[in-house]
């Protein structure tokens, strides 16, 4: 056994202590990396580095703080010179809902949704609400406009509520440097019009009823009912395509034009994604069953649907969200 390595009993205890912080560390890494898969890899690497370096952990800081230090540095290493992740809205203006505008961009690294259960803590409703708001798709997208170290500073100070002195120690820099980075990061987020706000820990009864009506109307492809549920200024995007639509009229022009193949779909509720309701959409298949088509993430504002994101990478996302690979006849 190497010097400084834990005993078998100590190792088990240490592993248990690491696991106590897994969910919040995945949440932190997800905000940094905008991918649940990369976030889980980052936390696994964090635990490996922590295990190997346990002899250097002298208990002068809490284990939680030490793990956050390692996790933040792992994320900074992973980001390196990589292009930021994006949503279609980040790449240009909304365009006409015609098939010619539907372009897949394989060179773009897209923001991926995350199940709430992977990153949102149990317990205190206030903490749940804050956690959900800090993983909203719009906020995570805005974070990607920040250089990695500014991103880390803002998350540690604004989301985790660390003191500037604690962040400076973690990043091995000065308090003045942390305050300067925080000021620049806040200015960038203000330009992006995205910052963590207030969110409920659970959906209100009215919102649950709205979603039930939406699922029913979408499955029936009932335009009249859908019109009453979707805001006039709603938006829709469909990564990995760069096309996004602005306004209910254009959304319906797409649904009843190039997107008509979605008529007759089954819509299956699943766990929330990024603090918002999510559904698995399955399109009709020739054998009478239903094939996976999209993970729908639905944003509700003021009692109506304000944003629809159709994530089309079902091969990776449906298992993550516990959705079946197909619905048989």
Image (spheres, grey):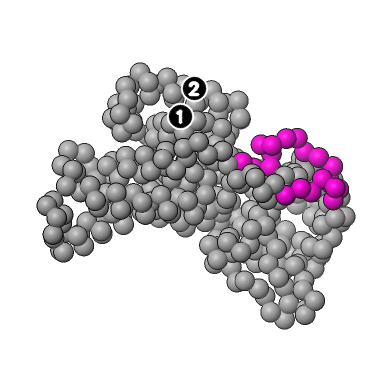
Spatial distance from mark 1 to mark 2, Cα to Cα?
8 Å
Q: Residue at x 50, y 36 (%)?
A: 81
Q: Residue at x 49, y 22 (%)?
A: 184
Asked if residue 156 is positioned above or below residue 205 in the image, the reply reads above
**To which residue does mark 1 refer?**
150
Numbered circle sitting on residue 184: 2
Q: Residue at x 25, y 52 (%)?
A: 51
Specify few, some or many for label 1: CA neighbours under 10 Å numbering under 14, 14-19, or 20 or more: many
Q: Residue at x 67, y 75 (%)?
A: 327
Compared across the picture, whether 232 is left or right of 181 comes to right
Q: Is residue 287 visible?
A: yes
- Span of residues in magenta: 86-104
Q: Quadrant of the N terminus?
A: bottom left
Mark 1, secondary structure of its residue: helix
Is most of the magenta stretch helix, strand or loop? Answer: loop
Image coords of residue 79 (percent x, y): 47, 40
- Say if the magenta span includes residue 289: no
Res. 56 image quadrant: top left
Image coords of residue 235 (percent x, y): 73, 44
Mark 2, secondary structure of its residue: helix
Q: Quadrant of the C terminus?
A: bottom right
Q: Is residue 116 visible?
A: no
Q: Earlier in the sequence, mark 1 or mark 2?
A: 1
Image coords of residue 233 (percent x, y): 76, 40
Numbered circle sitting on residue 116: none
Asked if residue 175 is positioned above or below residue 80 in the image, the reply reads above
| Foreground residue among 299 and 17 | 17
| Foreground residue among 42 and 180 | 42
Res. 60 image quadrant: top left
- Say if the magenta span includes residue 102: yes
Compared across the picture, whether 270 is left or right of 91 comes to left
Q: Are marks 1 and 2 in contact (CB under 8 Å)?
A: yes
């Amino acid at each position: 056994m190497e010097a400084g390595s834990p005993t078998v009993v100590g190792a088990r205890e240490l592993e248990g202590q690491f696991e106590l912080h897994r969910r919040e560390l995945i949440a932190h890494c997800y905000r940094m990396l905008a991918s649940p898969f990369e976030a889980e890899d980052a936390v696994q690497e964090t635990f490996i580095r922590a295990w190997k370096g346990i002899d250097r952990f002298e208990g002068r800081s809490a284990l939680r703080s030490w793990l956050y230090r390692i996790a933040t540095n792992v994320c900074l290493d992973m980001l390196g010179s990589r292009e930021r992740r994006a949503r279609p809205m980040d790449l240009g203006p909304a365009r006409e809902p015609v098939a010619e505008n539907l372009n897949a961009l394989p060179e773009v690294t897209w923001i991926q949704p995350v199940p709430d259960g992977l990153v949102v803590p149990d317990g205190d409703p206030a903490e749940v609400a804050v956690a959900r708001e800090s993983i909203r798709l719009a906020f995570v997208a805005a974070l990607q406009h920040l250089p990695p170290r500014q991103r880390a500073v803002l998350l540690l100070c604004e989301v985790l509520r660390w003191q500037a002195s604690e962040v400076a120690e973690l990043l091995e820099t000065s308090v003045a440097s942390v305050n300067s980075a925080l000021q620049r990061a806040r200015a960038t987020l203000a330009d992006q019009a995205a910052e963590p706000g207030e969110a409920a820990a659970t959906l209100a009864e009215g919102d649950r009823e709205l979603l039930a009506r939406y699922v029913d109307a979408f499955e029936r492809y009932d335009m009249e009912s859908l019109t009453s549920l979707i805001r006039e200024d709603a938006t829709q995007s469909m990564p990995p395509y760069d096309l996004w639509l602005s306004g209910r009229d254009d959304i319906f022009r797409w649904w009843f034009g190039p997107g008509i193949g979605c008529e007759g779909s089954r819509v299956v509720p699943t766990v929330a994604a990024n603090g918002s309701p999510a559904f698995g959409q399955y399109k009709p298949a020739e054998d009478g069953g239903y094939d996976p088509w999209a993970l729908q993430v639905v944003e509700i504002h003021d009692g109506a649907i304000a944003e629809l994101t159709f994530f089309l990478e079902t091969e990776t996302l449906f298992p993550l969200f516990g959705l079946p690979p197909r619905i048989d006849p």
